[in-house]
Image (spheres, grey):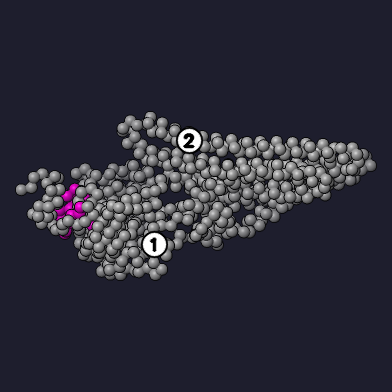
Amino acid sequence: MQRPIPSITVGQAEIAPPRGKVTEISLLWHFLSHYKKTMVGALIALLFASGATLMIPMAFRHMIDVGFSGEQTNLINLYFGLLLVVALVLAVATFSRFYLVTWLGERVVTDIRQAVFNNVIRLSPTFFEKNMSGDIISRLTTDTTVIQSVVGSTVSVALRNILTLVGGLALMAITSAKMLGLVLLVVPVVVVPIIFLGRRVRKLSSLAQQKIAESSAMANETIGAVQIIQAFTQERRESKKFKISIERSFGASVDRIFVRALLTGIVILLIFASMDLILWVGAHDVISGHMTGGELASFVMYAALVAGAVGSLSEVYGELQKAAGAISRCIEIISTKTDIEIPDTPLSFPAQDKGKINFNHVTFTYSSRPDEKILDDFCLSVAKGETLAIVGPSGAGKSTVFQLIQRFYDPLDGAILIDGVNIREADPEEVRKQLAIVPQDSVIFATSVEENIRYGNPQATDEMVSAAAKAARAYEFIEKLPDGMQTYLGERGTRLSGGQRQRVSIARAILRNAPILLLDEATSSLDAESEQKVQEALDILMQGRTTLVVAHRLATVQKADRIVVMDDGKIVDIGTHEQLLLKGGLYARLANLQFGAIE
C-alpha cells in the first residue's frame, strides 16, 4: 500500500492530492471542488455583471429611437436613471466577482503548492537522483504562479467573455437575424487560426517553462557552491554558462510571444474586417428602412462586445495553453509515487529490548547502476548495546548499509530486521524513529540553535534541549553566542565552525533518544581539537545504545566492540582492532597506510 499523503486542512475541508491517472482539468477540479460555494457566488456575480453589460446597448437603442426632443424629457430621464442603476449593479457584481475569483485562485494555488511539497518530502532518494532541486522549486513557485493567474483571473475572464458572447449573439439575433447570419458565416474564419496557433502556443509554453526550470536549477546549484566557484576563480565561466541558459529561456519565450502576438493580430484583423463588411450591409438597411438607427447602434454595440469577447477569448486560450504546461509539471510531482511502500497492516516494534539489528543475505543495486551489486549476499548481526564499526575502501558499500537500514531504499533480496521486525513490513516512519544519525556533513537549518537541536524531538521542553546541548559539549560555545540558544545560525549554519555544527547535530541525536545510533564519518572533517570535543560528546551519546560507525579514519574505531571490514559489497573480515591487525588482511593494510608500518 502506498503511504497516503497527509491531507491539507483548510477550515473544515480536508484536501488530499489526487491519485491514479490525473489530467490537467481533473487536477484543477480536484482542488476547486472543495470551494463550491465560492465558485457559485462568483458565478452569480459573473451573471449579474454580464447581464448588466448587455443591458447598456438596449438602453442606448431606445434613447436613439425615442430621440432627444423636449417632448421626451421624462423618458430620457428614466432611461438615464435606469442606466445609472445598471452601472451600480455592474460595479457591485464586478467587485464581488473579482474578489471571489482572486481569493479562489490564491487558495487553490496554496493547496497545490502544499500538495506538491507534501509529496516531494516523502519521495525516496531515487527521485532526487533524477530531478534537480532547482527544477522542483521552480514547479513550486513559477509554475504555480501561472496556475494562480489562470484560476484567479483567466478562467473568470473566459467565463465572462463566453457569457457576453452568447448573450450578445442572442440579442443580435433579436435585433437583426439577417446581419447575425452574416456574422456567423465569418466565425469559422476566426476560430480556425485560434485552434491551430493555440496548439503551437501550448507546445512553446511548455518548452519555455522547461528552459526556465533548467536555468533555476543551474542557479540553485551554482549559488550553493559559490565558495568553490570563487576559490577556483570560475565566476566568469559560471556566468557565461548561466547566460547561455537564460538566453535559451529567452529564446523559447520569444517564440511563444511571437506566436501569441500573431494569433491576437490575426484574430483582430479578421474580426474587424468582417464587422466592417457587416456594418456596411446594416447601413444600407437603415437607408432602405428595414431597421431603425437605434437598432443599428445597438447591433454595433453588441457586435463590439461580441468581437471584444472573441478577441479576449483568443488571448485567454493562449493563457490556458501556457497554464496547461505548468499544471502538467505539478501533476508530474503530485502523482509521483515513492519507491518505499508499506504493507496494509504494518508491523510494530517491541516496546522493550530494543537495539538488535540483522542483515540476512541482503543484495542491493542502485537503479542508476542495475548491473553493479553494491551489497552482495550481505549478512551481519549486531547485538543490543554493541558498538560496531564498518570500514573499508571507498565504494565498498559502507554508506549503503546506512541508507538501507533507514529504509531510504529496499534491498533486491534478503531482509533487514530491527528487533526481529522486517523493516520492509513496517511503516518507514516507525523504522526511522528507532534511529538517530550524526552525518559527516551536519545539516543545520536557517533558524535558531534551540530549534535546530529541538528538531530531534519537537515536543522536548526547554530543559531537555539545554540538557542535550550540555551532554553534546555544545553549551560551552552556545552561551557565548550573541543570543545564546536563540541565536540565528544562518543558511546551513554558516555562523558556526565545523566542530560546532557537529556538536549541534549530536545534541539533536541525543534529544532523539533512539535505541540505535548511526555515526557516518562524524569526525572525519574536523581538526584535532574539535575532534576531541566531538568524540567526548559521542562517547556520552553512545552509552546504552546500539551504535553503527562508518569511518575511513581507523583511529576513530579502535575502541569499537567489533570492526567489520567490507570490500566490493561483502564482509571480508570481522574482529577487534587487535585481532584484525594480527590477521594481516585488508584492515592491516589500511592501518599500515594510515598509521605507518605496524610492528
Q: Quadrant of the N terminus?
A: bottom left
* Nearer-the-camera pick, 560 or 479: 560
Circle 2 SS class: helix
Please name the amino acid that badge 1 sits on. Glu
Which region shows up in magenta?
548-567
Q: Is residue 244 above or below residue 494?
A: above
Residue plotted at (44% across, 33% down): 244
In magenta stretch: residue 462: no
Residue 56 screen position, x and y as percent: 79, 45
Front position in the image: 557 or 588: 588
Q: How far is mark 1 from mark 2, CA to CA? A: 40 Å
Please say whether residue 310 is visible from this viewpoint.
no
Residue at label 1? 341
Of residues 358 and 95, the one drawn nearer to the viewer in this rendering: 358
Q: Is residue 598 above or below residue 278?
A: below
Q: Which mark is residue 43?
A: none
Q: Percent from the top left, x then y, of residue 451? A: 37, 52
- Which residue occupies 48% across, 42% down? 210
Kind of residue at disc 2: Arg
Q: Are marks 1 and 2 in contact (CB under 8 Å)?
A: no
Q: Is residue 469 left or right of residue 85?
A: left
The residue at the point 38 percent across, 38 percent down is 222
Residue 356 visible, this angle: yes
User: Residue 412 lies in what quarter of the image?
Assistant: bottom left
For label 2, the residue is 248
